[in-house]
Amino acid sequence: MVRRAEPHQICLQFVTTRTTNLKVELKGHQTVSDQTDIRLGDALFLTFVHVSPLQGEFKTDEEIPYQLLNAGETADLINLSYQDSPQIVVPKLLKNVLHGSCRNPHHPSKDSLVEADSYMAQSYKNSDERASLLILSGDQVYADDVAGPMLVAVQQLIDLLGIYKEQALDLMLPSTVDDQLYNRDSFLPKEPWKSRSKLTLGYWLRKDEPHFSSVKAANHLVSIEEFVAFYVLNFSAKAWQLVTPFEFDTQGLSANQQTLFEAESRALKEFIATLPNVERLMANVSTLMMFDDHDVTDDWNLTPRWEQNIANSQASKRIVNNGLIAYWLFQGLGNDAHQVSGRLLGGFSNSLKDNVWYLQSFDKEINRFGQWHYCLDTTPKVVVIDTRTHRWRSEQDFDEPSGLMDWESLMELQEVLINHESVLLVSPAPVFGVKVIETIQAIFNTCGEPLVVDVENWMAHEGAARKLIDIFKREDTPKETIILSGDVHYSFCFSVQARFGRHDNRIWQLTASGIKNEFPKGLLAILEKLDIALFATWSPFNLFTKRWQLAVSKHKSDYENGRYLVSGSAISLVSMDKGKLVKYTLLHGTGEVTQFDLN
């Protein structure tokens, strides 16, 4: 993967099965390469190569062909090339950006990253059309929703590559994957029903509530070695050639489980077949990422109660920290090219003793790390925010949803946004969502069940919502703010302007979700009709929303004769001219294209 690319340095990320001596040469530049190896198993290395020019800076916004040398020998990268060799573009003036979120390998929809690869192949010679940045804004992996054959492959890869294991967790899990398959949720920690509030539905249902609130946790990842193997299998076609999960004997499963295993196998085989396209895409475009909940576990830090339950359980805390560590390794380190995240490398390597991970001391270090957010100095400026680890917690009610960012983080965001002509703001959850869906979430929250419908929208927390809106209303905020979001498994385009004030700042809410996931199409059509009926421009219901001082316009698409909510696996293409949005397109996994009317 090509990760962070800047005029003074380019970061590339590799996974290898043996020690290497890598050097990256860029055509037209004399370079020096610095290699960082993180050993994760007997035959598994996560390697980063930082390439810097000997003099001056790398050319920006131009294709730079590159080649890879290992111990002086040129590697064959023809499978990762659109022509003779792969190319890197160091982005500066952003014209086209690919963006998406939510990539679930065993979802039956098509992987729209394949369409992103097709787009890159078609636009290869046209710099005005070529995307110079790929932004993945959350749920790059689904650690809490793992297919049966995927879990089998994970266990096989751990043994095959000798991936280093951690101390066994006290979960009483069966000793073999055969007995764990589709049954892990029975062994995950739970909160006794008697400890919950009598005002919640869960108390009266008298059912112990799992700490992990995913409804698909039957194969939830547990150990650090599982998270590591899972990441490799999500992005490497070669890794799948080493394992045989589809030969697993399913006789010990129930009839329903056997049917599910077969359905997941069909979806995974299609996913695997297209992984070479995804590898080629990421070898030719700078790829930046940010976590959302499924990268670790569903509803991660949604309420103070959720956080408290996890913190009070050694096993639950270990699982969550394993997810965060895996994110740091495979996503976070490349986002800032080790500039800040690299400070954690020493503590992590010191946690390995006699090829066993003892991660308790490192947990404190990574939990105290507060700089998952980052920026990229381009036009428009890219600002990627962390909406998971700096939550604005309710002090009155531990079951209330937390704000997605606390006061200090919002003040820091305000300082980043002011005095720029245009900004590309990446928020995993939409800032401006669909009001009827937010209303339904509010109703469930009032009933004491925020986890049931994932009450994770910006407007769910009074303080965070008002502060964010105040930021957008300032006269010195960007004249053009383009917000890229995902999370919700459907796509839309809204534009926002203040009803009052002297400035004419324009905000675009562009939501693309999911890359390989979909919202039920029939249900989405019903919700769209309800939203139109209840929250039309003239509707008095708008006065009761937290954002009534902002005018939100919904932009129709050419999908099904003018729908503004689009379900269907897709990645978006955001086209800009000097920092201003000129086109918003969805590239569907099926090959179809949806265009939004920006007028």
Image (spheres, rainbow, N blue to C red):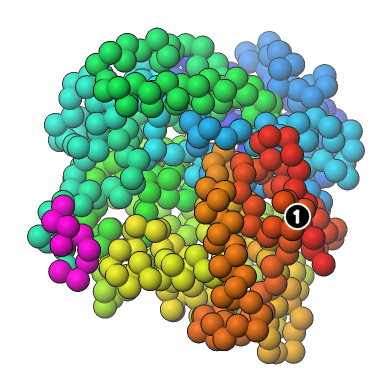
The image quarter containing residue 29 is: top right
Residue shown at 66% from the left, 80% from the top: 537
Q: Locate the N terminus by quadrant.
A: top right
Which sits in the foreground, 361 or 53?
361
The image quarter containing residue 580 is: bottom right
Query: Which type of secondary structure does the marked residue at label 1 adopt?
Result: loop
Judge whether 371 appears above or below 273 on screen.
Answer: below
* Magenta stretch bounds: 198-207
Residue 288, percent from left and from top: 61, 45
Residue shown at 43% from the left, 78% from the top: 462
Residue 145, percent from left and from top: 39, 38
Residue shown at 57% from the left, 82% from the top: 542
Residue 182 visible within the image:
yes
Judge whether 225 appears above or below 450 on screen.
Answer: above
To which residue does mark 1 refer? 561
User: Is residue 331 part of the magenta span, yes or no?
Assistant: no
Residue 374 visible within the image:
no
